[in-house]
Image: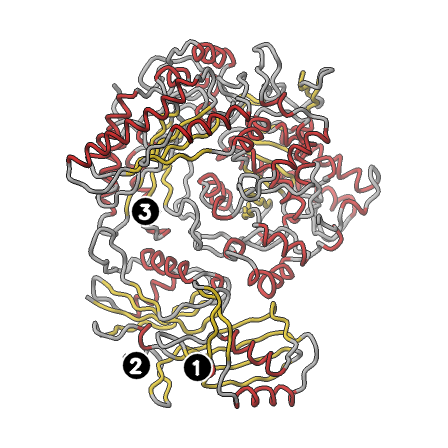
Amino acid sequence: MTKIRIAFSKEDPVRWLSHLDTQKLFERALRRADIPLAFSEGFNPHPKIAFASALAVGVVSLSEYVDIELAAEVDPDVVGEKLQKAMPEGVRILGVTIIPHNAAALMAVINRADYRLRAALTAPVTEEHLAATVEKALQQTSWLVERDGKRGVSTKDIRAGVFRLQASLHDQMLLIETLVQTGSEGNVRPDEVLRVLMEQGNLPVDQESLRIIRVGLYIAKGDQLRSPMEEL
Amino acid sequence: MHLQKNTWQHTEQEISQLLEERILAQVTKPTRYTGGEFNQVRKNWDDVDVTMAFAFPDVYEVGMSHLGLRILYHLVNDQPRMAMERVFAPWTDMEAKMRQAGVPLFALESRKPLKDFDVLGFTLQYEMAYSNILNMLDLAGIPLEAGERDLTMPLVIAGGPCAMNPEPLAPFLDAVILGEGEEVLLEFLQTVADFRREQAEAQHTATGSVQPAGIRNTGTQPASTQPAGTGVYGDRLQAKRELLARLARIPGVYVPSFYEANYDAQGRFRELTPTHPDAPARILKRVVRDFDSAYFPEEPLVPYMQVVHDRIMLEVLRGCTRACRFCQAGSNYRPVRERSTERLLAQAEKLVQATGYDEIALTSLSTADHSCVSPLIRNLIAQNKDKKVGVSLPSLRVDAFSVDLAKEVQKVRKTGLTFAPEAGTQRLRDVINKGVTEEDLMNTVTSAFENGWSTIKLYFMIGLPTETEEDLEGIARLAEAVANRGSAILRQKGIKKGVKITVSTSSFVPKPQTPFQWEPQMARAELEAKQEWLKKRLRDRRIQYSWHDARLSFLEAIFAKGDRRLAAVLKRAWASGCSFDGWSDLFQFEKWQAAFEAEGINPDDYAYRPIAYDEPLPWEHLDIGVQRSYLIGEHEKALTATLTADCRTGSCSGCGVCSTLSVSNDLRGKKG
């Protein structure tokens, strides 16, 4: 049995695919590319494909990861080429690597997500006000946000899950860069970070115009961020 | 809420930007509107002579499950100088966003507004999608009435099963294509392409213009800015009439505006007369003679989101000659033409490779009828086992053979099986010529229960001609007999799990071009009383009962057998807010009732009135090849519960299709 890890991007127009749609897309593309999949045992065999982390619908990602179990040995470069040809517009295969059988599941090890946000402002904001807002927010020890869940609305404190936050202005656009917690220990959503800033600084943001890009998923070890393609 | 034309002038770039930056993030299931699926074809419009948008008047996941769309989409796009794109009815949330932002209805591939296409073709799959057609035209900024559109607007055409009586839509359509589209659609589009080229050349010569831009609409010159009947606009109307005349000369193409409908003093349809020298008195439908070698796409679109039929659709045969008397498809798609096993296996192999789907559905009106179905299934399973690609059958006949097939394809998963006895007693099944006996059904379900199935769905119709209380009781009795048989077998096998029987009734809708076209529909109150009766009668805890909304069946009956006078009702109902009528939570029956009243049209006259054989019918100029004498004979046999044999195995029933259309049953298995 062989296990491979694939790094890929999810851009226009596939950024609109749900997590489930993305899973199906990979299953079908792998079959089109004639890559020898390993299947689960049992009544209803399914291919063994495990994604790193669900991505919200509409969010572009430049670094997604998936682990796949194969039934035969393969050349990772050949897999990458074949798979790229079997993919629709918007998915770029960024890398394929063989990983050990016992490599920890992506979902269990990935714990940092790096986001870029862009939203239009409906009224002018000064650089000074924005800088003060970020500073004020970062000084607080608690950021309470409300979240819609299966059991109704709950309140979460996301402050401890925000590791970096920078904001800037560009042509009436608010730009935010933030490194947040993701994975099994907890998830901070990038739009929640935006909402905290809006409340802290009374920022006049046109929320319908919000665009989000996930630029990186990482494994944090101490102060270091490592790529899932290196850290096996 | 309807559109202001002058604000709808967006280009594809502007539409794209609004979608990506504003709209898609705000709507449910955005992949309904993004396009970009694997195997999508996007052409450069500078390299083609004619463009068509295939319009499905329902949501994406319904439309993308339609095999006809996939066939025609790839067929047209395989022609180097033609382009076809797709458009579906936007769901209500998307429609609201589009109207708010002034985004006109656009095609998925290029995101160009529908107005920019040469041809906009709607498929008419069911009557209750008609309001969506008007809504889509409106959302596209295209005038509803054919007479209000010159050649700066697309030709709006239609095809599909309901095209066998498109009269309620006649004022809105420029042309209707009758029968199977594989050949005639290409002839149609080539005629449009040739005409446009000639026009462009003529204009070029006349004006000495250096830009032979033709008369394709660029979206910048709406017809309404020109004074009517004069100058360019008058020429354009004349040009359109000339184009329609050429199209009317193509066999299978019907141009409604070339005919005038007359009504008697009571407002009942009397006759339809041709008013144009190129309009034939009767239009004969088209049929594909050599189905085995007919075009079939081997690299079809693969949707992202889950669609209703999300699998490879392998079309194993076309047509059905079982001659069920209520069935419009049985009339429409005669005769039976099978594809050979060798071709199907080759197609399946390519389709698996090109789509990556893990399931192949054997699609047709009655797949178990294919004369080589057993070897086909065995070979398909063997061919695809290693890839873990399964085979499925979308519908089953009521016989043990079908259960054997189901067993073959579903070696492991035991989901429910569905059978359609259609009526509760032998007498009534004979009336409708459903060649199924109670013994057939009991043998079938016995085999199903013995082979591990415990859930059975049974489909029936209520309100069939000659139906009595005994027939209703028959439905309940059959369901109980099936449940009892299941319980006994499961007990015998020591299985603790209980049986589950679902009984579902639809209400009989008399359809045009069938032996029951002269029959009235049963009154709504009576149908509802029968549903209520069955609900009370089916108390058994193993049996679940579900039924169709009788009000919807009523409207379906009206529009199925309707004439041109209904166009005004449709338009009024749509204007008052009706759309997605087939979706129970959006269906607004009161608005339909109000529309009939306002137009002074009695709906009961269409649905409930028995029609005499000598009365003219609004669809009789549309010839599907089945003879009127055959339909009358079948209707009379129905009333005496006399059976007609399947002409594949029995003698010729004399329906007339083979001689009229120069075609014959084409079976691939050994004769006899």
Nearer the observer: mark 2 or 1; the answer is 1
Q: Nearer the viewer, residue A104 or B647?
A: A104
| Label 2 secondary element | loop
Residue lying farthest to the left in this orientation? B493
Q: Residue A231 has which mark?
A: 2
Gap in angstroms between the C-alphas marked 1 and 3: 43 Å
Give how far across and how far down residue B200 sits, in percent: 70, 44
Q: Nearer the viewer, residue B253 or B424?
A: B424
- The image quarter containing residue B572 is top right
On the picture, is A91 further left or further right than A83? right
Gap in angstroms between the C-alphas marked 2 and 3: 37 Å
Give how far across and how far down residue B245 sits, in percent: 67, 29
Pointer 2 local density, CA inside 10 Å: few below 14, some 14–19, many at least 20: few
Pointer 1 local density, CA inside 10 Å: few below 14, some 14–19, many at least 20: some
Q: Residue B359 has which mark?
A: 3
Same subunit: marks 2 and 1: yes
Q: Which residue is mark 1?
A: A161
Q: Nearer the viewer, residue B22 or A32?
A: B22
In the displayed structure, A22 sits above or below B192; it is below
Which of the two discs, 2 and 1, labels the residue nearer the N terminus? 1
Which quadrant holds the C terminus of chain A?
bottom left
